[in-house]
Amino acid sequence: MIAQTSKAPYYAVIFTSIRTEIDEDYLKTATQMEELAILQPGYLGHESARESIGITVSYWKDLESIKNWKKQSDHLLAQKNGREKWYSAYKIRICLVERDYDFKL
Amino acid sequence: MIAQTSKAPYYAVIFTSIRTEIDEDYLKTATQMEELAILQPGYLGHESARESIGITVSYWKDLESIKNWKKQSDHLLAQKNGREKWYSAYKIRICLVERDYDFKL
């Protein structure tokens, strides 16, 4: 679903990735990280899709919330496994969402 | 592919969308818009994936480049068709990319 974020400004983390062929624990961990992110202070929502590349955008109240989530211990282990097993490349972009607008039928 | 953007700061436009069941001219127009975006001054790259939602992130040098692309005439027509035919909902977020980092095997 499209994340129902509150009024801008807020922050976005764009995580773009290419997967390896190693699936071991990937889906389980991805689901756990999703459930855990939702519980973090400052979490506002996220959106995700994968075809030849994967794009996950998570939305946060401020930079402090992003820093705390980055160093959360289960998430640190997932990041390590990500580099060692699941991803051949990724890029992370930390962004200030300055404006947003939407359309609905 | 993961967009090879230059050093931050730069801008990102996150376009998150839900498609209708109407396919008429959709792929043709999406391809045309992609080819046209690449030619715009200030275009830096883009990334795209679709599952239950679609996420397209385009990267731009500055806000001026984004404004010019938004009002480009062929793109204006595509936006109109998007609301009338292809999308049941979308959200657009204009973001300042403050920092980025990447990982490669």
Image (cartoon, coloured by chain):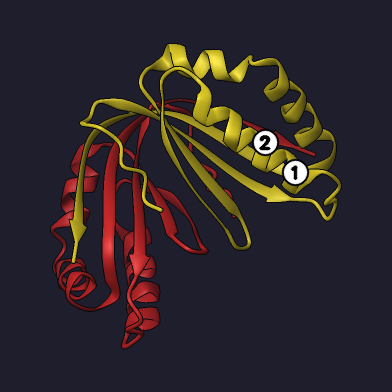
Chain colours: A yellow, B red
Label 1 element class: helix
Q: Residue at x 35, y 81 (%)?
A: B21
Q: Is residue B88 above or below residue A62?
A: below
Q: Residues within 10 Å of mark 1 (few under 14, many from 20)?
A: few
| Residue lying furthest bottom | B24
- Residue B88 at what x, y percent from top left? 27, 68
Q: Is residue A61 left or right of residue A24?
A: left
Do discs 2 and 1 belong to a common subunit?
A: yes
- Residue A56 at what x, y percent from top left? 53, 44
Q: Is residue B25 left or right of residue A105?
A: right
Count of marks placed on residues: 2
Residue A98's quadrant in the figure?
top left
Pointer 2 residue: A32
Q: Amino acid at mark 1?
A: Lys
Q: Residues within 10 Å of mark 2 (few under 14, many from 20)?
A: some
Q: Residue at x 36, y 54 (%)?
A: B16
Q: Amino acid at mark 2?
A: Gln
Pointer 1 residue: A28
Q: Chain of mark 1?
A: A
Q: Is residue B76 above or below residue A49?
A: below
Labelled pair 2, 1 in contact (Cβ < 8 Å): yes
Label 2 element class: helix
Q: Residue A80 — which label?
A: none
- Residue B62 at what x, y percent from top left? 27, 36
Q: Residue at x 24, y 26 (%)?
A: A9
The answer to whether residue A39 is seen in the rendering is yes
Q: CA distance from mark 2 to mark 1?
A: 6 Å
Q: Chain of mark 2?
A: A
- Give the position of the C terminus of chain A as an image quadrant: bottom left
Q: Residue at x 61, y 55 (%)?
A: A53
